[in-house]
């Protein structure tokens, strides 16, 4: 019996199978490009992300025939959102975190509600990058797409939906929308009313580690998975990484370089005060029950390293391919 972790990042996706003792049995990774339709606009082709995700699942499933996968969970980038119709068809590319088209939305919010109240409800310092702003942008700029949209899904719940499971997110990723009440652990009626966004457009929410459902046999067969694989909520990638690094008690933090460079400390309770807001530190549920996290991050972490690799490391890439090693190891 093995467990499958899926990590859906901003520049690539990974699948890793573990046995019950935590030993890695198999892994696979695929990259995908960011799309820049206009200066400052940054998107991902959600269909390509799903195709690459299917590839890594298939590759790992083949390698674990001797120790079949019984359950899977998803770790996902925050904020990026994809509109889907009633049949689950993807209607548009996802708008990723550091896209700037919603940069002016904080002014709109401050005309209607104090930023201190938004922070108190959601744990998010007011900023244009959050998912709720991106949904409002779709409504105002792509009304035909918005009209056809049944759900706006971040990548955790999008993967579940494409696996044939109910689109379900967890508390940590839901919080990154700026539409989730971290105190009541549900979508915020107040903020959705101000934004005039119906809650039916958002996914179901459960704590991390909750069973979402069983992958349909037809889908499992297409991916090379055994019958009966269970989907389980994971979380936002940073608190998922913190859990994996053993950051499960106050006074400990994780340092990581993914697409972004990030430090994630664990907190025993929400820290919602003026200093946190002043310094733009979010506070939201950890993937550990009854714990919280904050994050200090820099957008140009791994994305900058990849830019360097792709533009200045042609020799190293060639040598790495010949030797079957990672270019970053040579750099």
Image: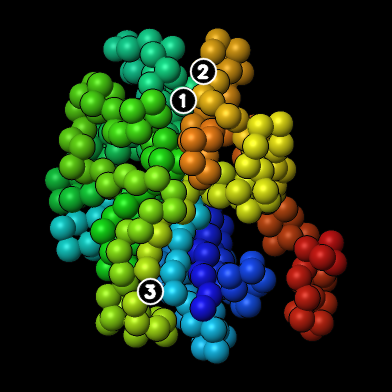
Judge the density around disc 3: few (<14), some (14-19), many (≥20) Cα neighbours within 10 Å: many
Q: Regarding mark 1 in the picture, which secondary structure is present there?
A: loop
Q: Residue 311: where, in percent of width, then height?
A: 72, 59
Q: Which mark is residue 42?
A: none
Q: Is residue 285 visible?
A: yes
Q: Which mark is residue 123?
A: 1
Measuring 46% from the left and 58% from the top, which residue is drawn there? 74
Measuring 67% from the left and 71% from the top, which residue is drawn there? 23
Q: Nearer the viewer, residue 230 or 219?
A: 230
Q: Determine the image quadrant of residue 109.
A: top left
Give the vertical position of 247 relative to 140 (above or below). Answer: below
Judge the density around disc 1: few (<14), some (14-19), many (≥20) Cα neighbours within 10 Å: many
Mark nearer the N terminus (2 vs 3): 3
Do tag 3 and tag 1 residues touch (Cβ < 8 Å)? no
Mark nearer the N terminus (3 vs 1): 1
Question: How far apart, in angstroms, are the residues tagged by discs 1 and 2?
Answer: 7 Å
Q: Which residue is mark 2?
A: 272
Give the colouring mode of the picture: rainbow
Q: Say which of marks 3 and 1 sits in front.
A: 3
Mark nearer the N terminus (1 vs 2): 1
Measuring 71% from the left and 36% from the top, which residue is drawn there? 252
Q: Regarding mark 2 in the picture, which secondary structure is present there?
A: loop
Give the vertical position of 321 relative to 164 (above or below). Answer: below
Q: Which mark is residue 229?
A: 3
Locate residue 274 relative to residue 262 in the image: left or right.
left
Do tag 1 and tag 2 residues touch (Cβ < 8 Å)? yes
Judge the density around disc 2: few (<14), some (14-19), many (≥20) Cα neighbours within 10 Å: some
């Amino acid at each position: 019996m093995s467990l499958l972790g899926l990590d859906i990042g901003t520049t690539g996706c990974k699948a890793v199978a573990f046995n019950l003792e935590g030993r890695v049995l198999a892994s696979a990774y695929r990259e995908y490009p960011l799309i820049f339709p206009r200066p400052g606009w940054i998107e991902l082709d959600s269909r390509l992300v799903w195709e690459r995700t299917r590839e890594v699942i298939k590759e790992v499933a083949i390698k674990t025939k001797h120790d079949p996968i019984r359950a899977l969970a998803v770790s996902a980038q925050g904020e990026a959102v994809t509109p889907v119709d009633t049949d689950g068809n993807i209607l548009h590319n996802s708008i990723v975190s550091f896209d700037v088209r919603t940069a002016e939305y904080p002014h709109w919010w401050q005309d209607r509600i104090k930023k201190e109240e938004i922070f108190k409800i959601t744990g998010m310092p007011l900023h244009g990058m959050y998912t709720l702003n991106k949904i409002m942008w779709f409504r105002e700029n792509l009304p035909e797409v918005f009209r056809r949209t049944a759900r706006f899904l971040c990548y955790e719940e999008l993967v579940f939906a494409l696996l044939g499971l109910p689109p379900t997110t967890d508390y940590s990723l839901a919080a990154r929308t700026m539409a989730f009440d971290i105190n009541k652990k549900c979508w915020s009626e107040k903020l959705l009313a101000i934004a005039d966004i119906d809650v039916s457009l958002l996914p179901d929410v459960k704590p991390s580690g909750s069973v979402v459902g069983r992958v349909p046999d037809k889908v499992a067969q297409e991916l090379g998975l055994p019958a009966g694989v269970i989907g389980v909520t994971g979380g936002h990638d940073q608190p998922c990484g913190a859990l994996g690094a053993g950051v499960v008690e106050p006074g400990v933090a994780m340092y990581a370089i993914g697409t972004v460079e990030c430090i994630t400390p664990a907190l025993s309770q929400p820290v919602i005060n003026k200093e946190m807001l002043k310094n733009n530190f979010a506070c939201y549920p950890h993937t550990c029950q009854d714990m919280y996290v904050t994050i200090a991050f820099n957008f140009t972490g791994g994305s900058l390293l990849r830019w360097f690799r792709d533009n200045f490391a042609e020799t190293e890439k060639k040598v790495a391919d010949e030797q079957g090693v990672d270019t970053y190891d040579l750099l």
